[in-house]
């Protein structure tokens, strides 16, 4: 099933790129917002991490109702997790643990390319709603895990083995191929439009490089974004 998704999305991307020369309108803009992410796993429930997303996008419009929306963004994903305090040993000294809940917060920063196609609904007025879907490809920039127990804090790389906290989170994959599904609205303002979007991305790659299906981890991310776009050609 996952392989069929990859093939379908790859064909969609190739078709969109091949048709760029026939675009009737060209636009571009910036947007930023909040990222709410965690990991999908059938056995373990991970906590939600609140992060940040920022990027630039283009709009290649082929018809009043159809467009390609390539976008390149920086986005912070991961999860914030509570763990039993007795597992949070710092410096190998069990006496430093507390009765409070400890936490292991994972932050993975990505440079992510999204290439969705959009169906828009032209209206007679300042509003233009749209729905979109397409493939994503994310390159990992950094991965850190922070362990907290009471007032104690230790940080390391996700796959780094530390004398203080032992092994980190996991060794992660460098690339994450996925799919994005979302919707938004453009609100005409000045020479362009204010944009508001909500979208969901699901990673199709098991980012846990050390495990097969036993502890498969897939990024999932809900983003709420605002931005501004201008028309570059008509």
Image (cartoon, grey):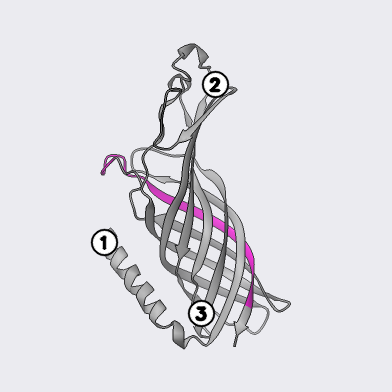
Say whether marks 3 and 1 touch (CB < 8 Å). Answer: no
Query: 10 Å neighbourhood of mark 1: few (<14), some, or many (≥20)?
Result: few
Earlier residue among tags 1 and 2 = 1
- Residue 138 x/y as whole percent: 43, 57
Q: Secondary structure at mark 2?
A: loop
Q: Are marks 1 and 2 in contact (CB under 8 Å)?
A: no
Neighbours of disc 2 within 10 Å: few (<14), some (14-19), many (20+): few
Q: First in sequence, mark 3 or 2: give its number.
A: 3
**How far, Cα to Cα, is label 1 from label 2?**
44 Å
- Nearest to the eye among marks 3 and 1: give it: 3
Q: Kindly identify which residue carries mark 3.
A: 60
In screen coordinates, is 155 left or right of 124? left
Q: Which residue is mark 1?
A: 3
* Element under disc 3: strand
Q: Is residue 1 visible?
A: no
Q: How many marks?
A: 3
Q: Which residue corresponds to the image point at 38% horizontal and 54% vertical from the top-left?
A: 175
Q: CA distance from mark 3 to mark 2?
A: 53 Å
Residue 160 seen by the camera: yes
Q: Nearer the viewer, residue 210 or 181?
A: 210
Quickly name the residue at label 2.
100
Stretch of the chain drawn in magenta: 211-230
Residue 53: name its quadrant: bottom right
């Amino acid at each position: 099933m996952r392989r069929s998704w990859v093939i379908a999305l790859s064909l969609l991307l190739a078709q969109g790129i091949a048709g760029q020369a026939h675009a009737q309108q060209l636009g571009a803009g910036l947007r930023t917002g909040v990222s709410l992410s965690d990991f999908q796993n059938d056995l373990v429930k991970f906590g939600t991490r609140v992060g940040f997303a920022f990027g630039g996008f283009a709009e290649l419009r082929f018809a009043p109702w159809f467009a390609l929306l390539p976008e390149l963004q920086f986005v912070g994903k991961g999860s914030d997790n509570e763990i039993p305090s007795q597992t949070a040993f710092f410096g190998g000294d069990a006496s430093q643990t507390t009765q409070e809940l400890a936490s292991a917060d994972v932050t993975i920063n990505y440079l992510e390319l999204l290439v969705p196609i959009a169906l828009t609904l032209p209206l007679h007025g300042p509003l233009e709603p749209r729905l979109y879907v397409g493939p994503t490809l994310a390159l990992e920039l950094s991965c850190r895990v922070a362990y907290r127990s009471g007032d104690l804090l230790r940080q390391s790389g996700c796959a780094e083995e530390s004398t203080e906290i032992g092994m980190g989170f996991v060794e992660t994959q460098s690339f994450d191929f996925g799919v994005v599904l979302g919707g938004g609205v453009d609100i005409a303002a000045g020479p362009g439009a204010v944009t508001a979007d909500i979208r969901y991305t699901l990673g199709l790659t098991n980012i846990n490089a050390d495990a097969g299906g036993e502890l498969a981890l897939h990024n999932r991310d809900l983003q709420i974004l605002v931005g501004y776009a201008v028309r570059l050609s008509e």
